[in-house]
Amino acid sequence: RFEVKGLENFKVEGPAIIVSNHQSILDMMGLMEVLPDNCVQVGKKELMYMGTVGLIIYLGGVIFINRKSTSSAKMVMSEVAKTMVADNVKVWVYPEGTRNCTGDLLPFKKGAFHLAVQAQVPVIPVVYSSFTTFYNPKTKLFTSGKIKVEILPPIETKGLTSDDVTELSDRCLSTMRETFFRLSGRPSQAKDSS
């Protein structure tokens, strides 16, 4: 079951970058609960080759990037910035860069934040609570449980430059970690690890 809070934070006029933590394919089910209109996802190119799942993702309009080629990824993201502004689209990115079911967030890659600053659009953080109480990533089996999803207030990027990307990324990670621990019932960890 999904418990969603903060949907009003998607009501941003114009394009935006949406960033969320990524634990497993269950995120995709949660995504269907909250995905705003005119929103596309960015995913790694390897997903295209995952049989039926790859076909569904491709048909869903996911923008694929080659993470092994920095110059190729930067070119794609530059085009995404132009397109999102021209077509008034929100872009959903998983800044951890990979699935992570460790009970914490991984350091963020900076692509989503460069994109937000380049396009001068807000960043909207989305946090899923930990799946560890009902999902075993080794066996890929899960029991019933509740996933809390919280959409946080947008973080403005107007006036920011590429010099501000690291600070923007760090601020977003810190806010999302605090929320992740709170949603996962571990608020004391958020304070210890900040």
Image (cartoon, rainbow, N blue to C red):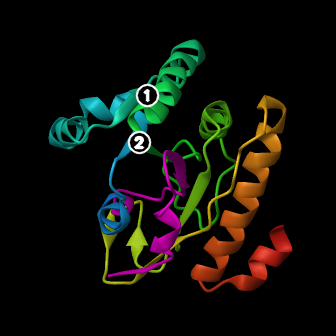
- Name the residue at 73% across, 47% down: 169
Q: Is residue 190 left or right of residue 39?
A: right
* Mark 2: few/some/many CA within 10 Å (<14, 14-19, 20+): many
Label 1 sits on what residue type? Thr
Q: Which residue is mark 2?
A: 89
The image position of residue 43, as x and y in percent, is: 41, 37
For residue 13: magenta?
Answer: yes
Q: Which residue is mark 1?
A: 83
* 103 up-or-down from 55: above or below: below
**Quarter of the image holding residue 138?**
bottom left
- Where, quadrant-wise, is the N terminus in this rendering? bottom left
* 10 up-or-down from 67: above or below: below
- Identify the disc placed on residue 112: none
* 170 up-or-down from 57: above or below: below
Label 2 sits on what residue type? Val
The answer to whether residue 131 is seen in the rendering is no
- Name the residue at 80% across, 40% down: 166
The image position of residue 116, as x and y in percent, is: 62, 39
The reply to whether dot 1 and dot 2 touch (C-beta < 8 Å) is yes
Q: Looking at the image, how many numbered discs can be counted on the residues? A: 2
Q: Which residues are magenta?
A: 1-27
The residue lying toward the viewer, choosing from 25 and 176, is 176
* 159 up-or-down from 118: above or below: below
The image position of residue 21, as x and y in percent, is: 54, 58
